[in-house]
Amino acid sequence: MFPKTKKIVEQIKVALSNSINWTSQRWKGMSPGFRYALVYFVCVLVVAGLVFWQYSPARTLVFDPSKQGEIPRDPDAEDEDVPGNEESPYVSLAAIEEGRETLALPVQGDIILSCGEVFSTGYHRITDGIHISGTRGDSVYAAFQGLVATVIEPGENEAGEVWIDHGDFQTRYINVEFIEVKTGDYVSTNQKIGELAAKMQGNHTEDYLVFEVWDADGEPWDPERYVGLDR
């Protein structure tokens, strides 16, 4: 080490030692009450600084390399009602009602029972959706892109079901087996989600799929209003 550098280091050591001794003497000379007050004041300053740092609007101005090139989004701008994709698969029910989007027919068959009609004379049950004819083993497709919300595997006395969330509405497919999707999966329109199972109860002579549309308030809607039958 150079003599001049060594001298500077020694001076720094002496200055630090003197500062420590002076602080120690001052601290010992204070009354206990004043010590506690001083410690409390320092703690308040530290906490206040942390709170200010956490909630300060200036933090949003810090440069983030991961967001370089992005266009800032106006927080007051309304979200555009555009078709969804895998990152944002949701579409407003208004887009369906206004005809800007349509639901695909989930099974290639005929509508043999409309929404609100009785489909089982024994139970006098009213259907919340439509019944679409088919043959066991036919492919069942997603009527619209979205996220799988619920999967119910078929049981001995229970039909298999798939519920797909599209934002402010949901489509349900009842009487499905060999289900190919799971909860949380993103599905696209016309993607196969399973196969048609054998007919359940009712007066139909052929196998059928129950297809339902539910809004965000838990009310069933007539799927025929939204299905594009030219699939």
Image (spheres, rainbow, N blue to C red):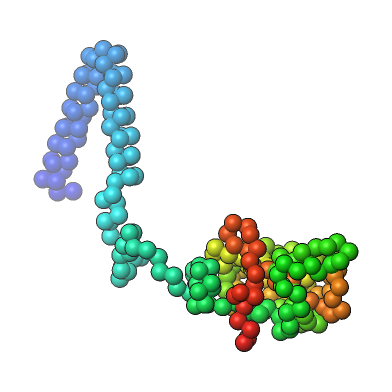
Judged from this view, the residue extending furthest toward the left is: 4
| Image location of residue 144, percent across then percent down | 59, 75
Tally the marks.
Answer: 0
Image quadrant where one finds the C terminus: bottom right
Residue 138 visible, this orientation: yes
Q: Is residue 154 left or right of residue 86?
A: right
Q: Nearer the viewer, residue 82 or 21?
A: 82
Residue 139 visible, this orientation: no
| Image location of residue 23, percent across then percent down | 21, 24
Above-or-below relation of 2 to 116: above
| Image location of residue 115, percent across then percent down | 70, 70
Q: Residue at x 18, y 48 (%)?
A: 1
Q: Residue at x 83, y 63 (%)?
A: 124
Q: Residue at x 14, y 36 (%)?
A: 11
Q: Nearer the viewer, residue 32 or 188?
A: 188
Q: Nearer the viewer, residue 93 or 37?
A: 93
Above-or-below relation of 124 to 20: below
Q: Residue at x 20, y 32 (%)?
A: 16
Figure quadrant of residue 157: bottom right
